[in-house]
Image (cartoon, rainbow, N blue to C red):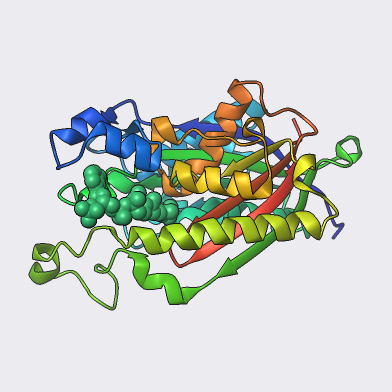
């Protein structure tokens, strides 16, 4: 097999039409728009309608990416679904998406890395293409966070939203020389597992009347712990991935960070010495969509004319686990 250069060739996204604003949330929990905007940067988030599950949003995002590239589902070799809100524990959401799409020649799997899901999916897809084993990998980040949020807990329910984004990674041709994947650095630290989790529904705490009554099937977070870890880790990993490739922050055309809290992004950007125009922030209109934040932010950057062929892009994430990662890609279209 011939080693190939992985390049991102297409991007498609889906955000459900229903919007939940901070003012709507004021009527549900004891919160207010000013607090949410000031402490998180979020104004509104999209919420999936009844009957729409993670696989449905993933399929819509995937179709948009395939259409942009003029590919058919049969052109896809591998489907990686990054999610913590699969339709069900099994079968894998990748199988449900494969079937709905009609991607008859694909294999695939789900990848569970919470907010770092998409960056881990990109790294996995890039490695599969680079090895020469596969020509086209569809990486989808999709999460229906509204289904696992406790709308009586103001410290978490205001943070998250629903959405999906897909990228296609392909083997580059000689004309794509210098474009595509450059490097990735990742870390997991399970000692932080207790700070952000959904306790029940797995083999440790299977569903029971008690777990439901105890609201154990919802997101639980110790926000300050996660916040401090995120600020430190985003900076450290970005610095590592830049320096070991001979780059400085000045070389970055665009940093596309995970959108968990505007203050985390601002702090990371400032510590790296990035100008505001080098950093994508779209948390205001989507909230934290977990595995979907990177593709949604990339789409917004393209729509705003901020992301162009040849640009050096730095993705960076921190999420439950803890999981974290930073990656450099040269945008290829
Ligand atoms: O993507 C996965 C990774 N997740 C993250 O990166 C999230 C990281 N953490 C955060 O973003 C922040 O910690 C939060 C936004 C979750 C919380 O912000 P904070 O500045 O750390 O607030 P806090 O938890 O220290 O709470 C400050 C005060 C408390 O009141 P008292 O005890 O000072 O009277 C909270 O009860 O704010 C109160 N509070 C709220 N007030 C109005 C907490 N949530 C709300 C709310 N509305 N929604």
Is residue 3 positioned above or below 216 on the image? above
Asked if residue 177 lies left or right of residue 251, the reply is right
In the foreground, 120 or 320:
320
- Expressed as whole percent of the image width and height from the top left, the position of residue 224 reads 37, 60
Q: Is residue 269 visible?
A: yes
Q: Residue at x 46, y 75 (%)?
A: 190
- Expressed as whole percent of the image width and height from the top left, the position of residue 176 reads 85, 37
Q: Is residue 98 visible?
A: no
Q: Quadrant of residue 320?
A: bottom left
Instruction: Tell me how many marks there are.
Output: 0
Q: Residue at x 33, y 64 (%)?
A: 197
Q: Quadrant of the C terminus?
A: top right
Q: Residue at x 57, y 61 (%)?
A: 233
- Expressed as whole percent of the image width and height from the top left, the position of residue 242 reads 76, 54
Q: Quadrant of residue 131?
A: bottom right
Q: Quadrant of the N terminus?
A: bottom right
- Expressed as whole percent of the image width and height from the top left, the position of residue 51 reads 24, 38
Q: Residue at x 64, y 61 (%)?
A: 236
Asked if residue 299 lies left or right of residue 198, the reply is right
Asked if residue 2 lies left or right of residue 201, the reply is right
């Amino acid at each position: 097999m011939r080693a190939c250069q992985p390049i991102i060739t297409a991007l498609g996204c889906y955000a459900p039409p229903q919007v939940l604003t901070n003012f709507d949330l004021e009527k549900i929990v004891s919160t207010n728009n000013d607090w949410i905007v000031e402490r998180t940067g979020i104004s509104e988030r999209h919420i999936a309608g009844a009957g729409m599950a993670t696989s449905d949003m993933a399929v819509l995002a995937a179709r948009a990416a395939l259409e942009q590239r003029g590919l058919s589902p049969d052109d896809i070799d591998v489907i990686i679904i990054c999610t913590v809100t699969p339709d069900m524990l099994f079968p894998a959401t990748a199988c449900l998406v494969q079937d709905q799409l009609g991607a008859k020649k694909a294999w695939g799997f789900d990848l569970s890395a919470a907010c770092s899901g998409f960056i881990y999916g990109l790294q996995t897809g890039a490695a599969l293409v680079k090895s020469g084993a596969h020509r086209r990998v569809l990486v989808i980040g999709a999460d229906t966070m509204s289904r696992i949020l406790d709308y009586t807990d103001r410290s978490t329910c205001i943070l998250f939203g629903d959405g999906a984004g897909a990228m296609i990674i392909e083997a580059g041709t000689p004309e794509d020389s210098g474009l595509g994947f450059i490097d990735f650095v990742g870390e997991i630290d399970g000692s932080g597992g207790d700070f952000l989790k959904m306790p029940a529904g797995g083999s440790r705490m299977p569903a029971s009347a008690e777990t439901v009554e105890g609201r154990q099937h919802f997101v639980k977070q110790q926000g300050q712990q996660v916040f401090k870890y995120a600020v430190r880790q985003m900076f450290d990993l970005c610095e590592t991935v830049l320096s070991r490739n001979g780059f400085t922050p000045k070389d970055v055309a665009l940093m596309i960070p995970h959108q968990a809290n505007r203050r985390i992004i601002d702090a990371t950007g400032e510590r790296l010495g990035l100008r505001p125009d080098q950093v994508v922030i779209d948390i205001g209109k989507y909230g934290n969509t977990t595995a979907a934040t990177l593709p949604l932010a990339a789409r917004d950057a393209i729509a705003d004319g901020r992301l162009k062929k040849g640009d050096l892009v730095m993705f960076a994430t921190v999420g439950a686990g803890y999981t974290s990662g930073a990656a450099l890609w040269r945008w290829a279209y």
